[in-house]
Image: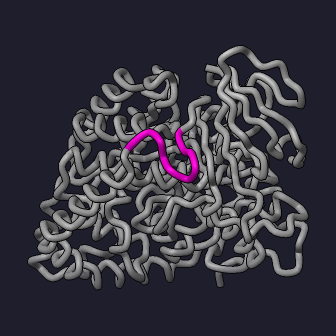
Amino acid sequence: MAVLIRGGQVLAGNPPSLSRADVLVDGSRVGAIGLALPVPEGTREIDATGRLVLPGMGNAHTHAGSHLSRGRVGSFTLEDLLTHSPANSGFRTPEDEYLSAAIGAIEMLKTGCTSAYDLYLAVPAITDEAFEAVVRAYTDVGVRVVLAPAVADVVFLQTVPGLAELLPADLRSVVEAMSPAPTKGLLELTERAIRRWHGSAEGRVRIAAAPTIPNQATDELLAGCARLAREHGVGVHTHLAESKVQAVESRRRWGKSIVARLAEHGVLGPGFVGAHSIWLDDDDVRRLADAGAAVAHNPGSNLRLGCGIAPVREMLDRGVSVGLGTDGSACADNQNLFEALRIASVISTLRFPHETARWLDADTVWTLATSGTARVLGQGGDLGAIAPGRKADLVLLRADAVFLRPLADPVKALVYAETGANVDTVLVDGRVVVEGGRVTTVDEARIYARAQAAADRQRADSAAAWAFADRLAPYVAAACRSAVATALPIDRFGAATPAR
């Protein structure tokens, strides 16, 4: 069915600018942009008077399973969060996972995000039934997604440097007895997901491989994920050097950086995406650029967990493709890319005092959330811009919103002032999925009510697991403080000066 979006101000071009135009959507793609367009009979018209027409933004990194745990995390480091993961994400049914994914997808649509790269994590391990539920949630709500089953064959607590020596005997015996899922089974699960779901929902669902954290992956798992990516033509996404603890542990255990280890096992390449990518040195950035790899920048989560400030300017200068993400709601609190836009820009100023040319300005971070994330998703030719032939993933924003009045530079207004509250209409693949600020594809109220009931039950069921994590946490924190005191030639906690 054709759709005519009439009378809006369309943000298009490079650099993007506003012009009054109509947008004709022919099936799933933009057919034409202009005034007085010939309109096929039976075309649905959408009055965009008083609206800005924007390309749908893309969320370069999130976690479907995390949204049910929103609001449970206080002043946690990344390692605190991982210590509490069994309590936060366990004790769930496949239907719980559906609800978690659905509320995240709804939030993304309602704040102008039409596509996402999702590393789906589950505790104690992903099942086919749970993964199917997440696929179903994204399909039902209508968000375009690259979905990757995030797997690990090394127990997290066994990767924290120095932790075993600090634990009392009873806790040490419990931690040493923990065993991961078998490598062969994790690779088989990933391959089943690719064979069954890659290209489903008329191509809106794609699948990728995801060794969730390289330090939690054996050489066999890394090599296996690289093999699956080559054989099936899919991407690989991982949490890359998110914390200094991870960077220190990689050098301690393997004598090399995380990026160097991934390169050794054939993981790097044009389809590789490293989320966070904070604790990288110049050689790591060079390796990523030379491999044609991409990075998912998550500034809000990086700050929330105290991980540091990623060297995005250096990556961009080297030619690394960078997209913008939120991370999951357990640690980022929301899925609002408008918030991430502002944080990405203002936090960059701290790394380069009075070097304004090196800051990430509004145009740069808008590009990260649109064409940058499109490249991260492996769909750079289809997404991230409004142009004939591109996918019709479009957002209509109320131009009379308080944050946009007066309107001078539209990109600056979107990055620094808009909150996402003024999204009125959203199309994905040419289909209207939000109208008048309400999702049209599912019953929002019913999903929220079911999600609240599921979260309440899971919180009660996980009380003992949470208490166990609380007992472990001081020892994990002490081990991490010791690791963080280790000198590295880079410092991502503040200004771009070497650690002393």
Q: Is residue 437 left or right of residue 363?
A: left
Residue 353 spot, x, y in % from top left: 83, 80
**Residue at left offset 29%, top offset 85%:** 474
Q: Position of residue 372 (x, y in %)?
A: 70, 45
Foreground: 381 or 272?
381
Please indicate whether residue 357 sits to the left or right of residue 414 in the image.
right
The relative height of residue 433 versus residue 334 in the rendered view (above or below) is above
Task: Tell me if residue 259 can be seen.
Answer: no
Q: Depth check: give the residue in front, 157 or 440.
A: 440
Name above or below for residue 106 compared with residue 220: below
Place residue 380 in its image quadrant.
top right
Q: Which residues are magenta?
A: 433-442
Task: Name the residue at 40% across, 49% down.
Answer: 212
Q: Is residue 237 above or below residue 493?
A: above
Indicate the quadrant containing the C terminus: top left, top right, bottom left or bottom right: bottom right
Tell me where residue 369 appears, x and y as whole percent. Answer: 68, 51
Estimate the x, y position of residue 107 in percent, counting from the top left. Answer: 49, 55
In reply to whether residue 435 is colored magenta, the answer given is yes
Residue displayed at 21% across by 67% down: 456
> Count the marks: how many?
0
* Residue 37 visible in the shown view: yes
Q: Residue at x 28, y 59 (%)?
A: 449
- Residue 194 is inside the magenta segment: no
- Of residue 309 and residue 131, the one placed in the foreground of this image is 131
Q: Quadrant of the N terminus?
A: top right
When asked about the image quadrant of residue 33, the answer is top right
